Structure formats: C-alpha cells, structure tokens
Image: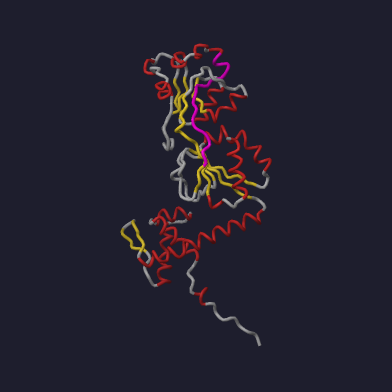
Amino acid sequence: MVKHTEPDQSLIQMPSLRAVKAFVAAAKYLNFTRAAESLCVTQAAISKQIRELESFMGAELFIRNGRAVRLTPEGAIFFDAVQLSLTNISQVTGRIRRQNSGKRVVTLCCTPAFSGLWLTPRLPEFLAKNPDIDLNLVTTQNFVNLEPGVQPDIFVNKLAKIREGYSSHPLAYDVIYPICSPDFLEQHPEVSTLEGICKGSLLNLSPYGRSQIAEHVDWYVWFEYHNVNFSTRVASEAQLLHSNDYSSLVQLAVKGQGVALGWHYLVEPLIEQGLLLRPVSEELVHKDSQHFLTFNEQKKDDDACCRMRDWILSKF
C-alpha cells in the first residue's frame, strides 16, 4: 500500500515569494514607484502583488494616501519578520552561485577619473594574478543616488561614510600642482613661473555635473591659495578651457594643449613616464581632503572581494 505524504500546512499557508519581495521593496522605500524601480518591474505589478498578498493574509499592509504610503501595524510586524529572512536567502543564494560558477564577481564603484587614470593602467596586473575574478566596474559622479540594482562591494571616492554596513579605509589626501607636457613647456617657457601660468593656456576643472560630495579645487581656488590674482587675466590672452571631465583635461595636457591641475595620486604615473611634468614646484597640500576605500562588510568572508580590497590598499 502506497503511503501518501500529508499536506505540509506550513508551506501551503506561505504567501508567494514574488509578492513578499514586492512587499519588502514597497515597505523599504514607502513608495510603490521606487519599489518597482528597485525590482525592475512596473508600478502596476507592485500594486497587483501587494493587493494579492493583502487578500491572502486578510489584512491591509499599507495605508494609502495618494502616492504616499505607510505601513499598518500588521504591515510593520510582517516587514520585521520577512526582511531578515529574505536577506539570509539572498546571501546564501549568492554564495552558492559564486562557488559553483567558478568565477567570482566583484563590483567596484568609483569616479571616471579614478577608473581612467589610476585603475586602468594597473588593472592588467590584478586581472593576470586573479583569473577567477570577473570585475564589474561602475563609474559615476553621483554616489549618493545610484541606479536601482547597483550594490557595490567596494567604493573609491571622498565619502568616508557612504552607507550603512561599509567600513572605511583612507587612501590618500590631495596634493595638487600644475602639469603640462614637455613639449608645451619647451614652446612656452613662461609657464615655468606662476605669473606665466596664470596668463597662459589653461585647462580648468569645472564643477558642473559633478557629485559635489567634497570641496572643489580649480584654477581660481589654486591661484588664490598662492596669492596670485587670477582676475588680472584678460580675455585677449591665451585660451581657458573648462570641462567637468578630468580625464579629458589630463589627455589634453598630454597633447600639449595647456596647463592643467594635477592630482598627484592620479597623474604620478604619467609624470614617471615622462608624458607630463611639473613646470613649477608650487603645490596645494590638502590633508583634510581624503580619498577612501569603503568596503561592504557583508563581503568580509568573500575571498574575491577581499583580494580586490587588499590589492587597492597595497597600491597606496
């Protein structure tokens, strides 16, 4: 006689996991639109899943007031219970997938300048020594509001406290000085003085479109620090090019288009290669302006993430 398994009431009475995910996202952001963006679905799908969940549970989970929502007492109880469970499921799933894929994925978020000038020249060394790691590189100037779905393991920027659950490691402080190509200095020997630089062709870092998470240093600030009156420069003198893309300014300096400001930790390799030089010895040392590596502490047992973190720290 075949023995039949009794119905598992604990599983039968469990709501849809898809509906629970929609609920957790909506409870986290208290906004159905943001919840939909975080799960890459439509707002209508979120609303439908939550309505079905409320029907299944026989209780309202949200108080709706136009676009604003807030949790009911029942919703708050349910959120406290399920968010930790989903976090545990996500972590275990990710760990198993990484172990069985043969490849480890590390997500690094940094500025375009750090990526282009610091990371890219050094990255082949790291990748050659770590063939089991796939790097997911995300560049941005807006670290406060990243796109939905971006969960970096490592940040490199000027924020010591970027979000909860991340530990901070100082990398370097700002040392800023003029840079130009050897050919430019040969053709314009006057830039070997601050007054000559002030009147010459300048490549200036503008603040527009940048993250504004730290103080901004441009030629105006740099000259004021050195007591040079930049306002005496007249329109008939050499060109002044503004750009919020620091990498492009450095490349223009390499191509002999003018004098730019160099952040030491970014341009040092180009100086060592002879592509750029310092026409004057003056510099601005800003020890209060630190750059940090911030590390997701949930990945402290992830060997690949730790290797990437330790490699970057070793280079500083």
* Percent position of residue 308, x then y: 60, 43
| Residue placed most toward the observer, 285 or 159 | 285
| Residue placed most toward the observer, 277 or 282 | 282
Residue at the bottom extreme of this rendering? 1
Q: Is residue 23 magenta?
A: no
Residue at the (61%, 33%) spot, across then down: 121
Residue at the (49%, 38%) spot, across then down: 157
Magenta residues, as a range? 169-185
* Percent position of residue 139, x then y: 52, 40
| Residue placed most toward the observer, 290 or 187 | 290
* Percent position of residue 110, x then y: 52, 39
Total numbered labels placed on residues in the image? 0
Residue at the (45%, 61%) spot, across then down: 22
Q: Quadrant of the C terminus?
A: top right
| Residue placed most toward the observer, 252 or 134 | 134
Residue at the front extreme of this rendering? 287
Q: How is the image coloured?
A: secondary structure
Q: Quadrant of the N terminus?
A: bottom right
User: Where 255 falls versus 122 (above or below)?
Assistant: above
Classified by dominant secondary structure, the portion drawn in magenta counts as strand
User: Where 89 falls versus 258 (above or below)?
Assistant: below
* Percent position of residue 149, x then y: 50, 51
Q: Is residue 287 left or right of residue 95?
A: left
